[in-house]
Amino acid sequence: MKRIIYFIILSNFLMGCKIHTRVGSVKNNVCKTLQKKTVIYAVFVDSDETHPWTDYDINSTLDSIQTAIKWMENQARANGVPLQIDLYNGLNVKKGKVIPFKQELKFKTLSGTLFHYMDIRKGIKLLDKWSDKISKDVTQSIPGDTSKMILTANKSNNRERLIAKLRNKYKTDNIALLFFINNYFENEISVALHTSSDDKTEYAIVSEKNPAVITHEFLHLFGAWDLYMSPFDKNIFAKNRKRKAMKKYPDEIMAFTHKRIDSLNLSPLTKYLIGWHNKLEKGAGNMFFRRRWKLLEY
Ligand SMILES: [Zn+2]
């Protein structure tokens, strides 16, 4: 069976202050709380080193995203959370309105690029550049008045411009930007980046058609954490925390993505992280938080 690593970069995910502890990924960045009108904006990307996107591949992936959306909306309904997710995808006007955009990854593959240097931050920078170049093409392909765009002064990049334009076009702040690469038959990772960042807009790169993986990455953008043990949990304490989480939440989508999506659900910890619960349920997440920490209530 192919082994796939799903992970997320959780830099500075806890920000302590004297009285309350704020979780860095909660209510942060572009995708704050998963509720109300939300847009998944899918961008299909071809490269010389990945499988070319055929119409069949694109359509089956769009079907998988729809399955993911249905699952999310059902979960929201069961939790009394208003949520409507709409799906749109980029059209490459330059290439005659075909769907895929084209951009080469610096070191051929997603994992090859991310892990090329010992210092993972360098790999992330390369992916940021990659996503930025595609975002420029995508932004240019969307007709409309750009004068109303809300830009962050001085430091806006193309990804920010794209998100500003999409926010304007679809009249919602919740824009989940997902880049899809066609690596279905290969060992490849999927990743969500900058989910706890204060100054870089978050996005995900998905290399799978499995609805559970798509949902997993989508939830990262709204603040959810990885709850499975990954090779990135280097020390024994991190491994133990994940082991406890997996045992406590055996059907949690942030811990298990290889199961069928219908058999998965969301733990109280994830519900807190994505903003469905305004406070953390007693006992939930106690493998991650020290008892003396008082988590912020929203
Ligand atoms: Zn993950």
Image (cartoon, rainbow, N blue to C red):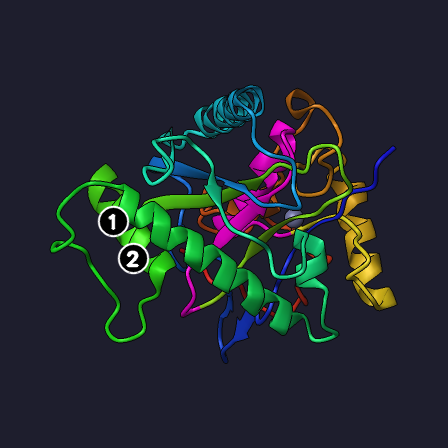
Q: Report the magenta residues as a range.
A: 198-225
- The answer to whether residue 24 is above or below residue 181 is below
Q: Is residue 112 left or right of residue 176?
A: right
In this view, the residue in front, 97 or 34, is 97
Three-letter code, disc 1: Lys
Q: Position of residue 168 (x, y in %)?
A: 20, 46
* Corner quadrant of residue 241: bottom right
- Quadrant in which residue 111 is drawn: bottom right
Cβ–Cβ under 8 Å for marks 2 and 1:
yes
**Residue at the bottom extreme?**
18
How packed is label 1: few (under 14 Cα within 10 Å), some, or many (20 or more)? many
Q: Quadrant of residue 186?
A: top right
For residue 61, above or below residue 226: above
Residue underneath mark 1: 165
- Residue type at mark 2: give it: Arg
Under circle 2, the secondary element is helix
Q: Is residue 224 magenta?
A: yes
The N terminus: image quadrant: top right
User: Was residue 255 drawn as part of the magenta stretch in this picture?
Assistant: no
Which residue is located at x 72 percent, y 67 percent? 116
Of 27 and 171, nearer the camera is: 171
Where is residue 150? Give x, y as percent. Answer: 20, 59
Rounded to the nearest angstrom, the CA distance separating label 2 from label 1 is 6 Å
Q: Secondary structure at mark 1?
A: helix
* Quadrant assignment for the C terminus: bottom left
Residue, disc 2: 161
Asked if residue 105 shows in the view, the reply is yes
